[in-house]
Amino acid sequence: MNSKNKHQLNPRISADCVVFGFDFSQLKVLLIEREQVEGFDISLSLPGDLIFEDEDLDMAANRILNELTGLNDIFLEQVGAFGNPDRLSKASDKAWLKAVRQKPEERVVTIAYYSLVNMNNYQPQASSFAKTACWIPVHEISELAFDHYTIFQVALKKLKDKIKTQPIGFNLLPEKFTLSQLHKLYEVILGRDLDKRNFRRKMLKLKIVESLDEKQEGVPHKPSQFFKFNEENYTQLIQNGYDNFGF
Amino acid sequence: MNSKNKHQLNPRISADCVVFGFDFSQLKVLLIEREQVEGFDISLSLPGDLIFEDEDLDMAANRILNELTGLNDIFLEQVGAFGNPDRLSKASDKAWLKAVRQKPEERVVTIAYYSLVNMNNYQPQASSFAKTACWIPVHEISELAFDHYTIFQVALKKLKDKIKTQPIGFNLLPEKFTLSQLHKLYEVILGRDLDKRNFRRKMLKLKIVESLDEKQEGVPHKPSQFFKFNEENYTQLIQNGYDNFGF
DNA sequence: CCAAAAGTGTTGAAGTTACACCCATGC
DNA sequence: GCATGGGTGTAACTTCAACACTTTTGG
């Protein structure tokens, strides 16, 4: 690596992030609106940008997400590379690139990441070229800039697959949560109903949640017990070869 | 995409392939020896090279694999992108790059693929800068050029995970095979013994294998029935939501 | 007749599914 | 006292894990 390359942009490689959030009723994705370009409607896109020459891919994804939304230090995992040569060739995208990039014609391969955040802890704030940052329910997402809709779909599938075998869902919840919230989260991500009693029994038997000495307050129904994720028990479980949460 | 870019190399992006094969007793990976560079031992690497500017990633992986080994049109699936800025900085690798690449100092992000082949159908033959192409048992693989050992490990893990839920193992076998061969394949990939009777029962109950009217001949023991993979039944199985082969 | 791998059933344990009612709270 | 969501147990069924002997062939 030449030292002259430090913090120069790599014009061929970008990182894009599919950030999932959960508001206790819906699964949402964080999208940005870019500044409008003459003649084209505002369009939504995933937060993403070119990486630096001397930058590791994972670091780049973190940095770019932070620059565009203010989010920092969150669960982030690679989805894969997307490099269809036509991925930047929609007219509206070309106009935007022309306004923003040094080499707007360059073919760019993007490395996609997905991440999970607790929406209450993080208030994303648009900055850099992002005009606004907003949470959109996954079912309302249709067209996105570039090939971002494809990337979003692949990331969502990856999330669905992964949550069946790994307790990554905890990243979408606050530190303390109720079993009903966890239950709802699984139903929303998997897109189907799960039996309440069976769900609770499984989570408790595996001992990956731990009851706290605290209950909901001020709710107009029987107050719910709070739980937290027990990481030690989970790690042990995985090390012993268990990898099927069976949903 | 500028038309001047047609078939120019993209100096920042490469594709590498982890090609798995199975000889009915061991799982092997196809590696190439590159031409020796002064002062450094020959070293083994994954088949891989820079992509073209106008080339889709999947197509590039296919082309590169074909150029280096003669293999064509095989199961190939993306593992992910590897882009640690230090990945090309071992002295021996730098010397080799200097001899082969136009821009040997360039930082390259590689997109890794893994693929499965029936070793009997394909006889890989080294060409281009590959001096030899050879099948190495996975347990004998230690050091590889660049970050290829890491890539190999990630690909192997992906194969292990995937074979638990998808019948991709059939790509490693001839069209007709015996249940013992299939059984052995699963044991080798998963790295543990599987009960013979339980294994057969499961495969037959799921109806993803279909018995042929043909038996082994010339073997000094009870001849084994041949089977083939039943893709229709498998597809239906998946569509009905079954995704746990339970190994 | 011997060596080698193929093929075959049963049983007990564990896990999964389906299902309905009482409880604690705020208003 | 009523509306709301929280919390609980059981029985039928399915799946899984463990285990040993007979069969067919070539030499």
Image (cartoon, coloured by chain):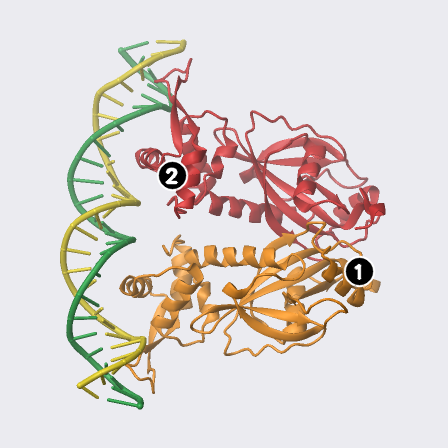
Chain colours: A red, B orange, C yellow, D green
Q: Badge 1 local density, few (<14 within 10 Å), some, or many (20+)?
A: some
Residue type at mark 2 is: Asp
Q: Is residue A22 left or right of residue D23?
A: right
Q: Residue at x 47, y 47 (%)?
A: A161
The residue singled out by tag 2 in the image is: A193
Asked if marks 1 and 2 fall on the same chain, the answer is no
Whether B69 is drawn above or below A109: the answer is below
Quadrant showing the N terminus of chain B: bottom right
Residue type at mark 1 is: Pro
As drawn, the label of residue A73 is none
Q: Badge 2 local density, few (<14 within 10 Å), some, or many (20+)?
A: few
Q: Residue D7 placed where, x, y %? A: 31, 25
Q: Residue A236 placed where, x, y %? A: 41, 40
- Helix, strand, or loop for circle 2? loop
Q: Report the chain holding disc 2.
A: A
Q: Is residue B182 visible?
A: yes
Q: Residue at x 56, y 49 (%)?
A: A154
Q: Is residue B72 visible?
A: no
Q: Residue B202 placed where, x, y %? A: 31, 61
- Helix, strand, or loop for circle 1? loop
Q: Report the chain holding disc 1.
A: B
Q: Residue at x 70, y 37 (%)?
A: A63
Whether B65 is drawn above or below A188: the answer is below
As drawn, the label of residue B104 is 1
